[in-house]
Image (cartoon, grey):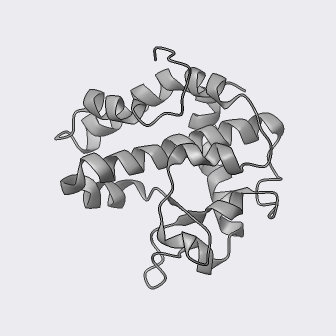
Amino acid sequence: MEFEKYYNTLFRTHFNQFVIQIPDASKYHDDSLRKEIITIQRERLTNKYDYLNFLSTQEYENFIIALFFTILVDMVCYKHHKTYYKQFQLLTKYPKFIGDCPGGCRFHLEPYELFDVINYKFDYKRIIIEATPTMQIEISSFFRDYLPDIDGETFWIQCKQNFPNLNHIEL
């Protein structure tokens, strides 16, 4: 299944299936009282847990790429557009990617670190390249429709600055 079709049809369902398996103490690590902000601790994506075993190989690859972009967009908004972040967070409810307890959980991890911890290695760079047009359109239209004070094209450039090394491929 192509990334665009996966992202627009299955990603949200698969994300919910994944998250529901994570114990609340980990899932709401940074928001234990309100339980509104989801955190994904690094180890929850490793072989130590089988939370993603319900996915086929292709779904797994697309899921990880979609999760990468989701975490990336949240991080870029927080980093570059703090005055709008609260509104962004209320609209998206995007998860945070954090380290493991004890101690590492105090740190938010870079989105590309997903590729260091996943259950098996795959050619994520190829899928990121394939996903780029879809995500650029998605991001631009989101900001146009919901947060028009943030320029979607500028935001996309800020996202690209946080991509893993793609061997200088022009995206």
Task: Indicate the position of residue 57 as horizontal and vertical percent values.
Answer: 82, 37
Q: Quadrant of the N terminus?
A: top right
Residue in view at x 56 percent, y 19 percent = 167
Task: Indicate the position of residue 63 as horizontal and vertical percent values.
Answer: 66, 42
Q: Is 34 situated left or right of 155 in this image?
A: right
Residue in view at x 26 percent, y 58 percent = 87
Query: Can residue 82 be seen at all in this image of the molecule?
Result: yes
Residue in view at x 67 percent, y 76 percent = 23
Answer with the quarter of the image where residue 131 lies.
top right
Query: Can residue 10 be seen at all in this image of the molecule?
Result: no
Q: Is residue 73 above or below residue 4?
A: below
Task: Indicate the position of residue 51 as horizontal and vertical percent values.
Answer: 77, 60
Q: Is 99 situated left or right of 17 in this image?
A: left
Q: In front here: 64 or 139? A: 64
Q: Is residue 138 above or below residue 111?
A: above
Q: Is residue 135 above or below residue 37?
A: above
* Residue that protrudes farthest toward the top in the picture: 170
Task: Indicate the position of residue 114 as horizontal and vertical percent values.
Answer: 62, 48
Residue in view at x 79 percent, y 49 percent = 119
* Residue that protrudes farthest toward the bottom in the picture: 33
Answer with the quarter of the image where residue 104 lies.
bottom right
- How many numbered marks appear? 0
